[in-house]
């Protein structure tokens, strides 16, 4: 049969049905749908997505099998939270900042600037952070999903076709590409003008000079072919970062035997670590390649400190502002910083 | 089994002439429901409708259609044709060449193949007939090529829809249509000149005064082309924004030369809303349908089946083109494209073909479907606007369909014709 | 009833046209203020997709249906006997009505969820999205009404020669 969607546990993914087998040592075969927006050959797929599936299959000795839906086959990445909570897919990739209205903390916490030194540094802490309250309850369980993998990108640096930014003052009056409300506030804090440009138009936006600076990291920019445009870049600003990961439908999770749950948690933790390490290496590699024909400036410690001072000021004022509306972002930030220090 | 029955139903619905948006919605809904259950269907339907329209780059579609409608209402194409005619009309095949040139120039302003066909049928066909081209040849030329030129030369709504559906770069696709468009125009000129020499058709030579006077009338066209080029190719805005720029420019120019008024503007807006709505309802249906394709694993099965037959990539490509020619009999361009791309696009790219190149080939092949009965919108439009019978339009289109197929053949042979410009971007 | 629906459609299509006009002006103005004054308008990129496109597409569905935009008659259908044509027409309409009723229902659920959870735009101007989702449901509902009404009106009314 060319259809495989209705057998086994996929059937139990419908909301509130809970018909799954709960006995702990059940060896019944479990088939789980996993959806992602990227092609199977893309970097993240090959360092995180596919290894995660393989590791779970290995740890459960083949009890769990995945039905893989890459390349947006199951729709747009912005909808993956809905599609997972409604049982269209069992597991999906997610980018919390795309659904920041329902995941108030997971996206913004990674966006705080000046906190992390590498993807691995951020990912290990973030993966732990989202398994704890309040973030677990507020961002995930409330939405009917549970996090399996938490991942933070490389810290963002500032890339440009026009000029190098080394000190915080340099951003004044520049048009900086923004990807959301948090980033816009941050850009304005430095006296820049946030310009929203949809990701598919990023290349055009840079090529035509619609934006002066783009806060991103090399692997992403490279995948959009921006390597051929960029002429200047910093190394070590840490202008925030992005977060993503995998979520599973909570009913499906509850229906899984304990050995499978354990296997998934273990696999999730492992790939968050190994995947982010690979990301850091990739970043180094691309920057080394880039510095052959563009100016990549590694910031000195004193330059970094100048940024750090401004960042701290922004972070605490942002937390203070949010407190008024009953946000727990201050608490979450403290937890995150503690985990980062470990 | 479910999949087989639904596929059969799909073909029956298309064959009996059910609107494609409804076919896609019905089969997509039934498919998701039967393959993945009611809850999955509810989840998908909730997000699909909103997601299918919610995107900044989607605004290019209504904006380019709006621009085309403002230009139509301003009757700018008439001036353009008149001017070109005065300059070259007296040469052998001059009227035919003027028709091709105007179609290409108007195509550079209009993203809509329907708008172009409609205007050129009204303006150019009567002139061609007067200068001794046969009715069927004149109407056939316009029916088969005016719209195709508009769809290839940027801006182009069909190419944008392809880009959105396949996540290919809009900018690259638009640029890559230029050379194939000019190539087609060149080949068409050869045909019309050859036929004109055979028929001995001529037009009176216009005086230099008349020629110079006619230029005065086309400054709005030149200005508008200039605005759009400025907007697209300089740093003012992205290509998405350029569409709104063009629409706004067309509106302002229309009012400046007193060809537009509030009533005509509202008509153009309503017409655009209608055409936009039509395209996006098909898009909603197609999105739903592609969920069904994904869940049924039809795409994967198809790819592995074709791999197992050891068919060469060129064999697969020719089969796909044949399929599009057949589909084109029954469906309009957007319908065929959105129905098949979820299956065909991964197949074609897995064979190593370039996504941008394939976009141009698909649009070119599907434009042929617009002049083939029973469903051939350009056939009906040309007949209606020019007063030439449908049968004669169809007869006259046949040699030009040959030209279009020849261009497809050249693009297969020399993919650089498509890929050279985007590689220089 | 039909007359009332036609009036409603007329109103909706004018609202949709107005949204289209605003879309053009907003994008144009955003480019101008960004390019010449370094002051882009916050939220334009998001608002055009989240609101204006929704208005243009979903409010105009029923009107477009009425004007024959979604319908095409083919030579094949002309070849069918009258009875066959009637049954076919009925089948297509019943199926279409069901789909648009489901769409009305699911988008209404989505609307209540947007309302209850106060889901907002991700742009820096965090306006609520519930009204936009409501428009999807409303447009689908009116479309369902139009299709239901057409069940009771002779099929000749829905036929439409293809025109430019
Ligand atoms: Na065009
Ligand atoms: Na056709």
Image (cartoon, rainbow, N blue to C red):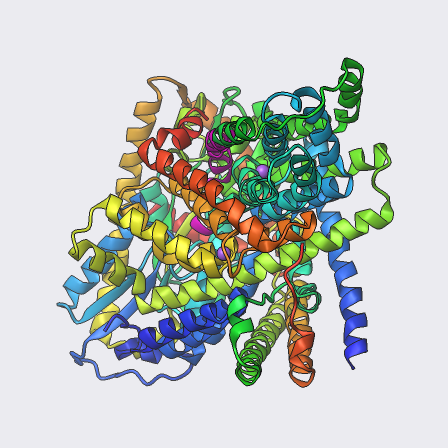
Estimate the x, y position of residue B322 in percent, counting from the top left.
35, 52
For residue A215, above or below residue A301: below
B360 magenta-colored: no
The residue at the point 62 percent across, 27 percent down is B229
| In-front residue for pair A41/B187 | B187
Which quadrant of the rendered structure holds the N terminus of chain A?
bottom left
The residue at the point 35 percent across, 20 percent down is A291
Estimate the x, y position of residue B182 in percent, counting from the top left.
50, 29
| Left or right of A70, for residue C82 | right
B182 magenta-colored: yes
Query: Quarter of the image holding residue A66?
Result: bottom left
In this picture, which residue range is highlighted in magenta? B165-185
Where ligand 1 lies, by image quadrant? top right
The residue at the point 65 percent across, 50 percent down is C48
For residue B93, above or below residue B411: above
Farthest top residue?
A: B208
For residue B332, above or below residue B90: below
Estimate the x, y position of residue A67 in percent, counting from the top left.
27, 65
For residue A161, above or below residue C51: above
- Chief secondary structure of the magenta portion: helix
Estimate the x, y position of residue A16 in percent, counting from the top left.
42, 82
Look at the image and tell me whether residue A251 can be seen: yes
The residue at the point 23 percent across, 59 percent down is A53
How many numbered circles are shown? 0
| In-front residue for pair B302/B140 | B140
């Amino acid at each position: 049969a060319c259809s495989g969607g209705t057998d086994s546990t996929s059937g139990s993914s419908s909301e509130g049905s809970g018909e799954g087998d709960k006995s702990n040592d059940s060896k019944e075969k479990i088939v789980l749908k996993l959806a992602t927006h990227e092609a199977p050959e893309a970097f993240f797929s090959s360092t995180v997505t596919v290894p995660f599936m393989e590791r779970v299959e290995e740890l459960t000795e083949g009890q769990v099998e995945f039905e893989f839906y890459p390349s947006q086959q199951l729709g747009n990445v912005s909808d993956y939270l809905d599609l997972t909570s409604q049982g269209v897919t069992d597991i999906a990739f997610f980018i919390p900042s795309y659904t920041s209205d329902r995941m108030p903390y997971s996206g913004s916490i990674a966006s705080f600037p000046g906190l992390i030194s590498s993807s691995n540094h951020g990912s290990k802490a973030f993966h732990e952070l989202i398994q704890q309250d309040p973030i677990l309850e507020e961002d995930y369980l409330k939405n009917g999903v549970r996090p399996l993998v938490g991942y933070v990108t490389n810290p963002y640096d500032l890339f440009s076709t026009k000029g190098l930014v080394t000190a915080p003052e340099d951003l004044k009056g520049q048009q900086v590409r923004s990807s959301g409300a948090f980033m816009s506030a941050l850009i304005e804090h430095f006296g820049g003008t946030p310009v929203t440009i949809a990701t598919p138009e990023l290349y055009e936006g840079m090529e035509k000079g619609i934006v002066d600076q783009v806060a991103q990291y090399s692997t992403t920019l490279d995948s959009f072919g921006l390597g051929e445009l960029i002429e200047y870049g910093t190394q070590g600003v840490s202008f925030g970062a992005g977060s993503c990961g995998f979520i599973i439908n909570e009913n499906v999770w509850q229906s899984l035997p304990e050995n499978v749950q354990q296997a998934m948690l273990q696999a999730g933790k492992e790939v968050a670590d190994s995947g982010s390490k690979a990301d850091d290496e990739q970043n180094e590699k691309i920057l080394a390649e880039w510095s052959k024909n563009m100016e990549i400036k590694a910031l000195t410690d004193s330059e970094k400190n100048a940024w750090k001072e401004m960042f701290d000021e922004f972070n605490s004022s942002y937390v203070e502002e949010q407190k008024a509306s009953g946000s727990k972002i201050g608490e979450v930030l403290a937890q995150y910083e503690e985990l980062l220090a470990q | 089994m479910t999949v087989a029955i639904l596929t059969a139903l799909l073909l029956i619905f298309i064959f009996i002439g059910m609107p494609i948006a409804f076919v896609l919605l019905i089969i997509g809904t039934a498919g998701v429901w039967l393959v993945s259950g009611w809850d999955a269907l509810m989840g998908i339907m909730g997000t699909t409708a909103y997601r299918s329209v919610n995107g900044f780059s989607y605004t290019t579609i209504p904006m380019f259609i709006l621009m085309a409608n403002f230009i139509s209402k301003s009757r700018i194409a008439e001036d353009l044709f008149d001017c070109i005619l005065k300059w070259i009309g007296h040469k052998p095949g001059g009227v035919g060449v003027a028709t091709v040139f105007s179609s290409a120039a108007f195509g550079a302003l209009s993203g809509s193949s329907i708008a172009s066909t409609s205007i050129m049928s009204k303006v150019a066909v009567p002139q061609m007939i007067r200068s001794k081209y046969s009715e069927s040849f004149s109407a056939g030329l316009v029916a088969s090529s005016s719209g195709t030129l508009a769809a290839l030369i940027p801006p182009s709504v069909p190419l944008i829809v392809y880009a959105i559906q396949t996540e290919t770069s809009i900018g690259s696709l638009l640029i890559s249509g230029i050379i194939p468009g000019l190539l087609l125009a060149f080949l068409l000129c050869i045909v019309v000149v050859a036929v004109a020499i055979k028929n001995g058709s001529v037009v009176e030579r216009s005086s230099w005064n008349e020629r110079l006077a006619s230029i005065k009338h086309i400054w709005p066209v030149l200005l508008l082309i200039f605005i759009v080029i400025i907007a697209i190719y300089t740093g003012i805005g992205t290509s998405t924004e350029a569409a709104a720029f063009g629409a706004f420019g067309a509106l302002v120019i229309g009012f400046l030369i007193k060809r537009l008024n509030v009533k005509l503007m509202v008509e153009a807006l309503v017409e655009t809303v209608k055409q936009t709505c039509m395209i996006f309802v098909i898009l909603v249906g197609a999105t739903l349908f592609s969920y069904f394709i994904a869940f049924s694993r039809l795409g994967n099965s198809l790819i592995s089946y074709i791999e197992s037959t050891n068919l060469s990539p060129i064999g697969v490509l020719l089969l796909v083109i044949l399929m599009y020619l057949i589909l084109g009999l029954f469906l309009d361009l957007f319908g065929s494209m959105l129905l098949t791309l979820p299956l065909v696009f991964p197949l074609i790219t897995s064979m190593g073909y370039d996504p941008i190149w394939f976009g141009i080939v698909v649009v070119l092949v599907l434009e042929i479907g617009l002049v083939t009965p029973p469903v051939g919108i350009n056939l009906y439009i040309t007949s209606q606007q020019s007063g030439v019978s449908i049968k004669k339009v169809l007869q006259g289109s046949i040699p030009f369909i040959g030209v279009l197929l020849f261009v497809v053949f050249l693009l297969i042979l020399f993919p650089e014709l498509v890929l050279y410009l985007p590689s220089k971007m | 009833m039909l007359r009332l629906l036609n009036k409603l459609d007329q109103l909706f299509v004018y609202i949709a046209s107005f949204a289209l006009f605003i879309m053009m002006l907003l994008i144009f103005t955003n480019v101008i203020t960004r390019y010449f004054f370094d002051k882009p308008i916050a939220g334009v990129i998001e608002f055009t997709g989240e609101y204006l496109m929704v208005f243009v597409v979903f409010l105009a569905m029923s009107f477009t249906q009425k004007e024959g935009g979604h319908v095409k008659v083919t030579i094949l259908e002309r070849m069918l006997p009258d009875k066959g044509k009637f049954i076919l027409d009925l089948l297509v309409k019943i199926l279409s009505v069901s789909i648009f009723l489901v769409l009305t229902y699911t988008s209404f659920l989505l609307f209540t969820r947007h309302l209850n959870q106060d889901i907002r735009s991700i742009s820096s101007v965090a306006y609520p999205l519930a009204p936009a989702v409501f428009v999807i449901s409303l447009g689908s509902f009116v479309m369902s009404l139009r299709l239901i009404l057409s069940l009771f009106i002779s099929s000749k009314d829905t036929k439409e020669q293809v025109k430019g």
